[in-house]
Amino acid sequence: MDLQRILIVVIAVGMIAGLWLFTHHTHLGPAFRGIAQDERTALTFGMDPDRIALLAVSFGAGLAAISATVIVPLGSISPEEGYDVLIKALAVCIIGGLGSSGGVIIASVMIGFAEHFTDSYIGSHWTMIVSLAALLIVLIIKPSCIFGKQKELEERI
């Protein structure tokens, strides 16, 4: 493992911890979570959804810029690479569960190791199938995702 990959892991853990601390221990954190859960109710509490949305997009762009700056030394970036990342991100979010931050982190590690194992022992042209196969298996076995709880019938209707 080279120094760049270790730096990526350290910065990723720092960004996750910083984002969790921001959403749980600052004045704006509950506003972000409130707008995400129910915009109308948050509006009745005096939160400005347009301002919060602007800040959320700004923070997302900042996190993406930091991530890109750290990952770019590993290789080149081209527009065609976006589809692979999009499919992997979709698979990780669905497998881990959109409401579960821990589930998304664990799903990303599991898919990453599975793709590395596939690349090392089976072949590099099979790595994209790993995330899609994992997505299919999880949706068949447990549609509520890894750590998701099955919703009550009344909530789904």
Image (cartoon, rainbow, N blue to C red):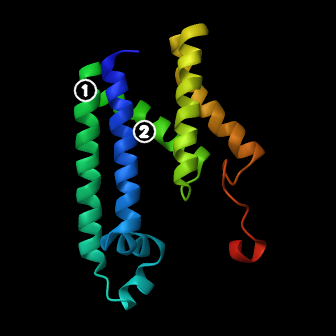
Residue type marked 2: Leu
Residue depicted at x 34% and y 61%: 22
Q: Which mark is residue 72?
A: 1
The quarter of the rendered structure image containing the N terminus is top left
Instruction: Determine the residue located farthest toward the bottom in the rendered image.
Output: 44
Q: Residues within 10 Å of mark 1 (few under 14, many from 20)?
A: few
The quarter of the rendered structure image containing the C terminus is bottom right
Under tag 1, what secondary structure?
helix
Whole-percent x, y for residue 145 in the image:
66, 50
Whole-percent x, y for residue 24 in the image:
41, 66
In the rendered structure, the answer to whether residue 154 lies left or right of residue 88 reads: right
Q: Quadrant of residue 49?
A: bottom left
Residue depicted at x 55% and y 59%: 99
Q: Residues within 10 Å of mark 2 (few under 14, many from 20)?
A: few
Give the mark nearest the N terminus, 2 or 1: 1
Residue under label 2: 86
